[in-house]
Image (cartoon, rainbow, N blue to C red):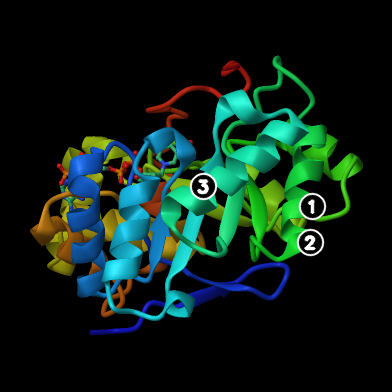
Amino acid sequence: MTAVPDITLNNGVDIPQLGFGTFQIPPAETREATLTALEIGYRHIDTAQMYGNEKEVGQAVRDSGLDRDDIFVTSKLNNPFHAPDDAHAAFDQSLKDLGLEHLDLFLIHWPLPGVGDFVETWKALEEIYRSGRARAVGVSNFQPNHLRRLLGGSVVVPAVNQVEVHPYLTQDEVRAFDTEHGIATESWSPIAKGRVLDDPVITRIANEAGRTPAQVTLRWHIQRGDIVFPKSVTRKRVEENFALFDFELGEADIAEISALNRDERTGPDPDLMNG
Ligand SMILES: NC(=O)c1ccc[n+]([C@@H]2O[C@H](COP(=O)([O-])OP(=O)(O)OC[C@H]3O[C@@H](n4cnc5c(N)ncnc54)[C@H](OP(=O)(O)O)[C@@H]3O)[C@@H](O)[C@H]2O)c1
């Protein structure tokens, strides 16, 4: 098994570049799916209050027999809790549900620009960070205009920005803004929930490399420097998605996959999502 590389965040905390996503895994299946991922070698789990499965993720972390310090756990603030007092209470509830003393990363899930002032929400996350109960804090689904506003009113620079990225939505502008400000980009829906796997360019490159379309797509993210956490409840796929570190794509392949961009989202537009 080849080791998953770490990315060092802007506060010195290391995060495994490949993790396991848990969106849409029903609570009844989450413990087993997460335990399978941990058994295969994943050491980074991405969950959220919105997913309704934090209890089961925490159960798996505790049942895995692994040291808590060897697993990187991320959760995210749910949309109704942007008021600073609510954000504190929701964070406390996450720790309780997960049964953990601390989170490795806690994110504002959506900016909700039409709902309230996310700079005030961010101040609550800064307090949580200073308390040591989250080793790093960041944001999700923030566009450059949201980040500019956030950076103008905050002390702590977000460690990550978790946004939708895949070959049909390469997010060049957001990723460049993140890089310029020392913010790591996490790519959600890295295989576009499966939509890119039949793409002729990706299937051709996969055939040439003797790999699957999912592996080629995930490897493209890795070589671009992003953090990814594909989701699967299918053991064979969870194994497949982990086997990314014993091959490399050439620069021409990377460029060809990047050229597939058509600004196509599988999820909501962050500028329009308001609750
Ligand atoms: N911050 C946000 O707003 C946000 C939004 C969405 C997602 N996320 C995070 O990003 C993670 C990943 O995104 P996602 O779950 O939306 O989509 P994804 O990882 O791009 O795709 C998941 C889908 O692809 C299938 N799949 C996985 N591996 C495969 C493979 N090797 N071959 C064929 N099919 C495969 C899965 O099926 P099976 O499970 O049936 O095997 C599932 O239907 C989430 O789980 C979550 O942690 C964050």
Crowding near pointer 1: few (<14 within 10 Å), some, many (20+)? Answer: some
Q: Are marks 2 and 1 in contact (CB under 8 Å)?
A: yes
Task: Name the image quarter holding the N terminus.
Answer: bottom left
Q: How far apart are labels 2 and 3 at the CA level?
A: 17 Å
- The residue mark sitting in front, 2 or 3, is 3
Q: Position of residue 66 (x, y in %)?
A: 33, 79
> As displayed, is residue 224 above or below residue 194?
below
Crowding near pointer 3: few (<14 within 10 Å), some, many (20+)? Answer: many
The answer to whether residue 212 is visible is: yes
Q: Position of residue 199 (x, y in %)?
A: 21, 40
Measuring 50% from the left and 76% from the top, which residue is drawn there? 6
Task: Say left or right for 267 vs 218.
Answer: right
Q: Nearer the viewer, residue 48 or 186?
A: 48
> As displayed, is residue 13 above or below residue 36?
below
Of the four image quadrants, the one with ligand 1 is top left
Task: Name the image quarter holding the C terminus.
Answer: top right
Disc 2 secondary structure class = helix
Upstream in the sequence, badge 2 or badge 3? Answer: 3
Asked which quadrant contains residue 121, the reply is top right
> As displayed, is residue 143 above or below residue 129?
above
Q: Amino acid at mark 2?
A: Arg
Task: Say left or right for 173 vs 201.
Answer: right
Which numbered disc covers residue 127? 1
The residue pinned by badge 2 equals: 130
Asked which quadrant contains residue 25, the reply is top left
> As displayed, is residue 82 above or below residue 40?
above
The residue pinned by badge 3 equals: 94
Disc 3 secondary structure class = helix
Say whether mark 2 is within 8 Å of ligand 1: no
Q: Amino acid at mark 3?
A: Ser
